[in-house]
Image (spheres, grey):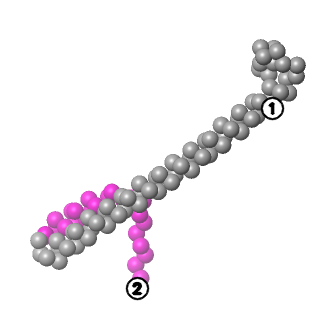
Amino acid sequence: MSFAEAVQRTLSLSNNSIVWQALCLVAMLVSLVATISMQLSKSQDAAAQLSAAEACDTELEGLQTLLELGQLQVRDATDLYIKYIAKIPFVRKAPVSP
């Protein structure tokens, strides 16, 4: 006995095509929910990346200010720079123009 036949008998249905139609409808709905969930997750990831990039920009601006005012040694600034950019590995390096 197949799954559709078992469901047909359990629900006292006259035709097992109704079972298959219901199964296809459920599969379609699950697929739709999965697609929407994935898109929402991607948009949240983009928001988190934007927030991290903006925070890093603020840190780098502060670092630049400290260097310009002579409040920080270049060696210490380099260590902080490496620490700050490690937080945004998703940002690619910009090409250097000649």
In the image, 46 versus 83, the foreground residue is 46
Task: Determine whether the residue tagged by mark 2 lies in a helix, strand or loop.
Answer: loop
Q: Which residue is mark 2?
A: 98
Position of residue 81 measured from the top left corner of the image (x, y, whole percent) = 25, 65
Position of residue 26 measured from the top left corner of the image (x, y, whole percent) = 71, 33
| Above or below 4: residue 83 | below
Task: Determine whether the residue tagged by mark 1 lies in a helix, strand or loop.
Answer: helix
| Above or below 71: residue 48 | above
In the image, 84 versus 33, the foreground residue is 33
Disc ID at residue 9: none
Few, some or many C-alpha atoms within 10 Å of disc 2 (few <14, some 14-19, many ≥20)?
few
**57 magenta-colored:** no
Residue 53 visible? The answer is yes
Q: Quadrant of residue 63?
A: bottom left
Residue at point 16%, 67% (across, down): 75
Amino acid tagged 2: Pro
Residue at point 43%, 75% (across, down): 95
Which stretch appears magenta?
72-98
Q: Residue furthest left?
A: 71
| Above or below 33: residue 39 | below
Quote the CA–CA distance across marks 2 and 1: 64 Å
Few, some or many C-alpha atoms within 10 Å of disc 1 (few <14, some 14-19, many ≥20)?
few
In the displayed structure image, the side of residue 57 where residue 93 appears, left or right: right
**94 magenta-colored:** yes
Look at the image and tell me in which quarter the N terminus lies.
Answer: top right
Residue 1 visible? The answer is no
Disc ID at residue 21: 1
Position of residue 52 measured from the top left corner of the image (x, y, whole percent) = 36, 58
Comes first in the chain, label 2 or label 1:
1
Amino acid tagged 1: Gln
Residue at point 60%, 46% (across, down): 36
Look at the image and tell me in which quarter the C terminus lies.
Answer: bottom left
